[in-house]
């Protein structure tokens, strides 16, 4: 009864009552299928299109991409598709990084076109009444114009009518190969350019832009890394009482999400004992034996930006002498490599330095016979690192030989 009274009081407090009639004085907030500063003021400030990134920054990204594109060329970027776990159950949707980077739209079903003449043109899905009942509102043409600040916007059903003329007016076409869809690839105009070898992968340009992060992006990445670090530290404290790979994976995911992360960057790698040597171990189904080490490779995503870190420790509380010697070597190598992370260095250069240090140290420990031994690459076939950003392995089109610049993350 008291709960009902409190609920009624809250309702009345938002209304002005005249006689037997009442009217709502609450401001109506339009739902566009993703957070806005009006619907989620706890996440976005006025002027933000996505949390931490302003509308102006998105517009600037589009201008920079157009500056890179050749004259009379067109760029097409499709949203990521919805992937199904079963016939009726979808996997949690994750937007394609390039589409999100250019449009700010976090939803599936759209196709964005960028050109010197048309600016940003977005083809948006249309919600059917039944879809809204089951899945909620989605961003349509109005949201494309008002929220995403597209120069032009049309419903998807207009794509086959409008896009062919845009393609025919272009001498070269760039598109996101990863999310390419028959909606535009089956158009005769697209096929004609493809036949003439005038269709290219857009990621050559988008990865070049995404490689250098803005101050707003760096801030989000630091926050993402901070969340992952806090989560991992609490998981380490948890490991002595609960020495099970699966429990530690669940713990780190919980701690990340309760601190604001939307998802994990990848399935946590939690390898106890010999499982820690499996690079992308994902079963996480074993008990960690007393005296064994556990390796965790984890990361989370915060508003589209990822973190990625790896740590190894003894859940029992102490290293054996052999474990401690090897751990000390790797820690020393890590510290030296961090010092090398400066403008002008490259991932390849830093990696080669790590190989030299580890080969020398492993020989001194008696694990390798000689410094030039090919056995080293069997022990450690991975690189020292990779670029980091909107994707875990970010900007794959940028070579590891490129000199690092301010704004790079890896």
Image (cartoon, rainbow, N blue to C red):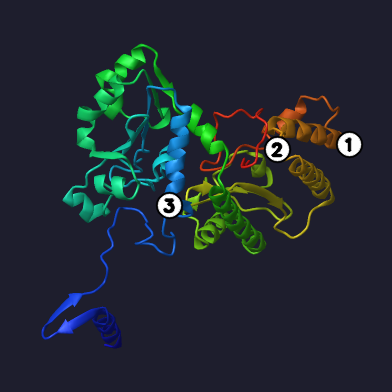
Single out the mark in the foreground, 1 or 2: 2
Task: Name the foreground residue: 155 vs 33.
Answer: 155
Q: Residue at x 54, y 50 (%)?
A: 216
The residue pinned by badge 1 equals 364
Residue 314, image x, y percentages:
72, 55
Q: Residue at x 87, y 36 (%)?
A: 366
SS category of the residue bearing label 3:
strand
SS category of the residue bearing label 2:
loop
Q: Residue furthest top?
A: 196
Q: Quadrant of residue 339?
A: top right
The residue pinned by badge 3 equals 50
SS category of the residue bearing label 1:
helix
The answer to which of marks 2 and 3 sits earlier in the sequence is: 3
The residue pinned by badge 2 equals 343
Task: Name the foreground residue: 230 vs 210.
Answer: 210
Q: Where 378 sits versus 328, above or below? A: above
Residue 278, image x, y percentages:
63, 39
In the visual, does 86 lie left or right of 16?
right
Q: Where 254 sits versus 105, above or below? A: below
Contact (Cβ within 8 Å) of mark 1 with mark 2: no
Single out the mark in the foreground, 3 or 1: 3
Q: Residue furthest left?
A: 20
């Amino acid at each position: 009864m008291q709960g009902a009274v409190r609920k009624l009081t809250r309702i009345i407090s938002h209304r002005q009552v005249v006689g037997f009639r009442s009217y709502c004085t609450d401001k109506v907030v339009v739902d566009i299928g993703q957070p806005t500063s009006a619907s989620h003021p706890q996440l976005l400030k006025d002027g933000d299109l996505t949390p931490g990134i302003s509308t102006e920054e998105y517009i600037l990204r589009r201008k920079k991409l157009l500056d890179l594109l050749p004259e009379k060329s067109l760029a097409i970027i499709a949203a990521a598709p919805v992937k199904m776990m079963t016939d009726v159950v979808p996997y949690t949707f994750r937007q394609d990084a390039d589409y999100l980077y250019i449009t700010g739209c976090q939803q599936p079903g759209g196709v964005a076109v960028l050109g010197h003449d048309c600016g940003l043109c977005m083809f948006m899905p249309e919600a059917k009444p039944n879809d809204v009942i089951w899945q909620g509102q989605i961003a349509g043409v109005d949201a494309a114009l008002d929220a995403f600040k597209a120069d032009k916007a049309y419903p998807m059903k207009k794509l086959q009518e409008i896009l062919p003329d845009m393609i025919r007016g272009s001498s070269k076409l760039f598109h996101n190969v990863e999310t390419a869809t028959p909606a535009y690839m089956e158009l005769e105009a697209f096929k004609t350019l493809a036949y003439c070898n005038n269709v290219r992968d857009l990621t050559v340009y988008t990865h070049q832009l995404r490689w250098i992060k803005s101050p707003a992006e760096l801030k989000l990445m630091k926050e993402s890394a901070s969340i992952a670090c806090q989560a991992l530290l609490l998981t380490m404290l948890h490991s002595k009482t609960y020495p099970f790979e699966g429990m530690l994976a669940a713990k780190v995911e919980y701690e990340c999400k309760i601190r604001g992360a939307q998802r994990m960057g990848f399935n946590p790698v939690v390898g106890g004992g010999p499982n820690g040597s499996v690079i992308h171990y994902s079963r996480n189904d074993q008990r960690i034996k007393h005296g064994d080490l556990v390796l965790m490779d984890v990361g989370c995503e915060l508003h589209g930006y990822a973190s990625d870190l790896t740590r190894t420790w003894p859940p029992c509380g102490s290293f054996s002498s052999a474990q401690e010697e090897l751990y000390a070597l790797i820690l020393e190598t890590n510290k030296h490599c961090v010092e090398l992370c400066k403008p002008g260095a490259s991932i390849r250069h830093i990696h080669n330095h790590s190989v030299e240090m580890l080969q020398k140290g492993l020989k001194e420990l008696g694990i390798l016979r000689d410094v030039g031994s090919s056995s080293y690459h069997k022990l450690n076939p991975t690189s020292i690192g990779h670029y980091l950003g909107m994707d875990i392995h970010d900007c794959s089109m940028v070579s590891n030989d490129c000199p690092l610049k301010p704004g790079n993350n890896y």
